[in-house]
Image: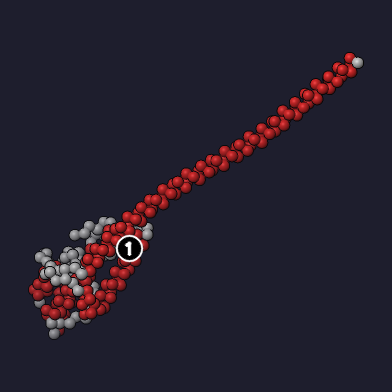
Amino acid sequence: MFSQLKLILFFMLLSTAAGGLWYVQHLKAENEILTLNNAKLEGAVAEQQALIEQQLRDIETQKNINKQISENNAKLNKDLSLANEKFNKVNASGERRDIGALAVAKPKSIERIEGRREQQRSRCFEIAQGSQLTEEELNATKKSQINAECPSIANPNYVPY
Amino acid sequence: MREQILEVLKAHFGDKPINDDTHLMDDLGGDEFDIVDVFMQLEEKLNISIPEEETFDVMTVSQLIEVVGKHVQST
C-alpha cells in the first residue's frame, strides 16, 4: 500500500516535471517568435520613419519651389505692367509714341518686333514655371541682349540704365 | 544729311553724346519701336522712302546713316 502511494507520487512528480519542461519549451519557442516579430516591427518602424523624413524633405523642397514660382510670378507681373507703360512711351521731345500709327506705316517692322516679343513672352512664362536660364540669358548685360518682356527674371545680370 | 539725322536722334532720345558707334538701344536706351519711329521721322524730314527690310538690322548710328544716305543720294 505504501509502495503504491510512493509510485503514484513518483508519477505525479514526473508528470508535473514533464509538464513544466513542456511549458518552458513552449515559452521559449513563443519567445523566439516574439523576438523575430519584434525585429520585423522595428525594421518596419525604421522604414516608416525614413519614409516620413523623406516626405518632410520633399514637402520642404516643394515649398521652396512654390515660393520661387510665386516670386517669379510677382516679378513677371511687374515686368509686364512696365512693358505696357513702355509700349506708349514719350520721347525726349514730349511726343507720345503711337504704336498703331507705326503699325500702319511700317507693318512688316512691327510684325517682326511683335513676333520676337511674343517669343520672349513665352520664354518668360517658361522661366516663371521653373525653366533654367540659358548662358545667353545669364550673360546678357546690354539692352539689345535682354528679354525685353521680363528682364528681372530672364536676365539677372542686367542692370537697367 | 548727317546733321539732320543727328537732330532727329537728339529730339527723340535727348541730349546724350552721339557718334558713329553709338548703339541706338545700348547707348541711347531705345527699343525696337524707337528705331522704327526714328526711320519714320527721317523719311518725313528728308522726304524719302526706305524699304522696311533695309531697316531691320540697323542698330548703330553709322548703320542708320548708311541706310538713310543710300536713299537721300538716290533721290
**Type of residue at label 1?**
Cys
- The local secondary structure at tag 1 comes to helix
Q: Is residue B6 above or below residue A26?
A: below
What's the residue at 77%, 23% (across, down)?
A: A17
Judge by depth and name the residue closer to the eye, A101 or A115. A101
Q: Quadrant of residue A18?
A: top right
- Number of numbered discs overlaid on the protein picture: 1
What's the residue at 66%, 32% (across, down)?
A: A31
Image position of A89 (left or right of B2): right
Residue furthest right as drawn: A1
Which chain letter goes with mark 1?
A
Q: Is residue A154 above or below residue A89?
A: above
Where does the image place residue A61, in percent across and percent down from the top left?
41, 50
Q: Colour scheme of this structure image?
A: secondary structure
Judge by depth and name the residue closer to the eye, B6 or B73. B6
Where does the image place residue A102, in percent across and percent down from the top left?
21, 76
Q: From the image, tell me which residue sits under label 1.
A: A124
